[in-house]
Image (cartoon, grey):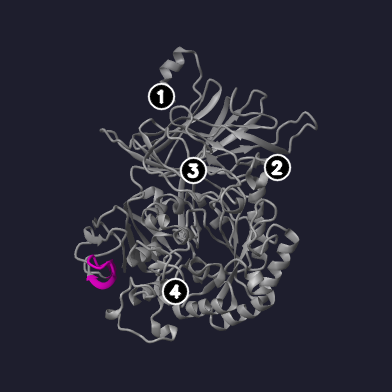
Amino acid sequence: MKKKLLLLSAVLASLNMAAQVASVASPDGKLKVNVDVQSGKPVYEVLYDGVQVLDASPLGFVADHGDFAQDISFVSKREGHLEFNYDLRVSKASHVHVDANQLVVTLQNAKGYPYDVDFRVSNNDVAFRYAIPNHPSRANGKKFSVRIMKEATGFDFPSQTTTFLTPQSHAMIGWKGTKPSYEEGYGYDEPMNKKSQYGHGYTFPCLFHVNAAGKGTKEAWALVSETGVDSRYCASRLSDMKGDGLYTVEFPMAEENGGNGTVEPAFALPGTTPWRTITVGTSLKPIVETTVPWDYVTPRYETAHKYQYGKGTWSWIVWQDNSICWDDQVKYIKLAKDMGFQYVLVDNWWDTNIGKEKMTKLVKYAQSQGVDVFLWYSSSGWWNDIEQGPINIMSDPIVRKQYMRWMQQIGVKGIKVDFFGGDKQETMRLYEQILTDADDAGIMVIFHGCTIPRGWERMYPNYVGSEAVLASENIYFSQGAADKEAKDAATHPFIRNTIGCMEFGGCFMNRHINRGNTGGNTRRTTDCHELATCVLFQNPIQNFAITPENLPAAEQGGNSQSAEAIDYNAPGAPAPAVSMDFLRQVPTTWDETIFIDGYPGKYSVLARRSGGTWYIAGNNATGAPLKLKLNLSMLQKGDKVTLYSDNLKNREPQKSAVKVTNPKAVVVTMADQGGFVIVK
């Protein structure tokens, strides 16, 4: 049995000890955090609705001027209440209301140096960080900077907990030495004592199922992550389990970024660390709907620009490197125009295969067709072996500014920057520098081969998404990835995508993942599954994996066939018109998100609202057809809705008008590796 954090006051009194306990509860009283100092070490515990979510978990850090994790004494506490609203254009909700109680605990170390632990507790979220004032220094009487050598911060889960985690890879491995890039697979319902694949712990976010075995006790879910990371700190991860259920915050590996830059972050005093966040609930609903990644961060700068979001075509994902040429990009610009999409993404090697001079003409041509351009860049300078161009631009502040001005002059609207080198503070500075220089030029930014966003949707007005997931390109490269696409799609809404934008780049309409819709890997999912991912996956700019051959032959300049005569699984076949028409209308920004049903890796059902229209989508990775009875509170009896569903006989998409008879019991059936979308 683990030692409980709180002792009865009578026991404390009998031991002639002064109580050093501070507590804060959520506005609804269900979520509670208790803070204590035990044997000189600061700890906290988390309880939700009668469930012990975290046992006594360590707090504190070690800095260059002292140890703030042991020989600690309690100084004071102060309490408060926070209630405010903010707008968030590019995530799961456009308008957010925050209602939280605050507890600030002041502690001091053996030298008498104080620091605060600031807790914010809303109905399903805990966020906390350290605030460090100026401290005396042996050299000059005051210390105005600090270097954090390590954190003691931990999360100690009860024994009956299973995990849904993705490992941190070795540094400088993978394609041209570009890892870690947050592109490892997940484990499902695994025991906590299982070691991570590479021995470096796990990347955020991390999902835990407390009391997963049941046995008469309440179960709970907890998602652990961090937010508010910018140029003033490094990004972190969780360690492997230490002892009985304890995971601690770990800094980057020394080998990241090719060994360049320090592992330990440093910042000016007074200053604060990033927020550590814990989202809890007795179901997955609070996990999916949480806004805690953005609640307590603030914009790093204001923008003079109004950015437009939408859909784009992207040749590289199916047609690969050889498509980065003038003729093929013209085809994809035409495809974007025909689909009513706003953007085309021109990927790597454009500097060699097209060149700056012709790119100016290509951008002008695209704009004449009502389409704007995103351009790909490597982030690399000296920390990996990437040769795809353009290289050595985004890492050079002088050249980077020159290219930003050039892109602004010719009308480029966005960039995709790829192949980052790790999570050190040095890399966080690069992310921020790219974003700020791009905003000066009115350019949006997508990151690829990168870390997760940590509140960046609110912090940086021109940020529009990060990959940081085992994304769509793997379906092209590996049949194994294609075989498990549905399982991955039933995972990301509960973990990776719930904490920030996810630039997955999917929604394949090719049945054969290769140019011409022939050869290559075979897509296992149904069209309705692919359509559902447009709703299940959230990113304000979606670059879909469609190709010109997905359009009917008549639109490609050939002879048309009737829909009834087409074998859509045949090599070279176009996509069903019902699928392409859906892609023309589905939005990419949302005003509201609601969890409906699901379990990580098995199936997922979410509802998202854009303006006055609801999109309710689901996918199935259970290995068999799945029939669900859903409670859809956003619908009313008598509503007429449009249903996109799998034909269970031939797995083809079908569109039908349906009248809702009982919104609390809407029945849908999905094929294995299938999906559905309801539009109201």
From the image, state whether disc 1 or disc 4 is nearer to you. 4
Inter-mark Cα distance, 1 to 4: 60 Å
Quarter of the figure that contains the N terminus: top left
- Tag 3, which secondary structure? loop
Query: Reading the chain from its start, which is encountered first: label 3 or label 4?
Result: 3
Q: Is there a contact, CB below 8 Å, between mark 3 and mark 4? A: no
Instruction: From the viewer's side, name the closer residue of 555 and 218.
Output: 555
* Figure check: 406 above or below 217: below
Query: Reading the chain from its start, which is encountered first: label 3 or label 1?
Result: 1
Query: Reading the chain from its start, which is encountered first: label 4 or label 2?
Result: 2
- Tag 1, which secondary structure? loop
Query: Reading the chain from its start, which is encountered first: label 3 or label 2?
Result: 3
Q: Which residue is mark 2?
A: 268
Inter-mark Cα distance, 1 to 2: 39 Å
| Number of residues whose C-alpha sits closer than 10 Å to that of mark 4, classed few (under 14), some (14–19) or many (20 or more) | some
| Number of residues whose C-alpha sits closer than 10 Å to that of mark 2, classed few (under 14), some (14–19) or many (20 or more) | some
Residue 195, image x, y percentages? 46, 35
Q: Given the current orientation, which residue lies at the most extreme left position? A: 661
Identify the amino acid type marked 4: Gly
Inter-mark Cα distance, 4 to 2: 56 Å
> In which quarter of the view is residue 29 placed?
top left
- Residue 615 lies left or right of residue 465; in this view the side is left
Q: Which residue is mark 3?
A: 167
Identify the amino acid type marked 2: Ala
The answer to if 666 sits in the magenta stretch is: no
Identify the amino acid type marked 1: Lys
Residue 602, image x, y percentages? 32, 51
Q: Which residue is mark 4?
A: 516
- Tag 4, which secondary structure? helix
Q: Is there a contact, CB below 8 Å, between mark 4 and mark 2? A: no
The answer to if 647 sits in the magenta stretch is: yes
> Going 61% across and 77% down the picture, which residue do you hit?
363
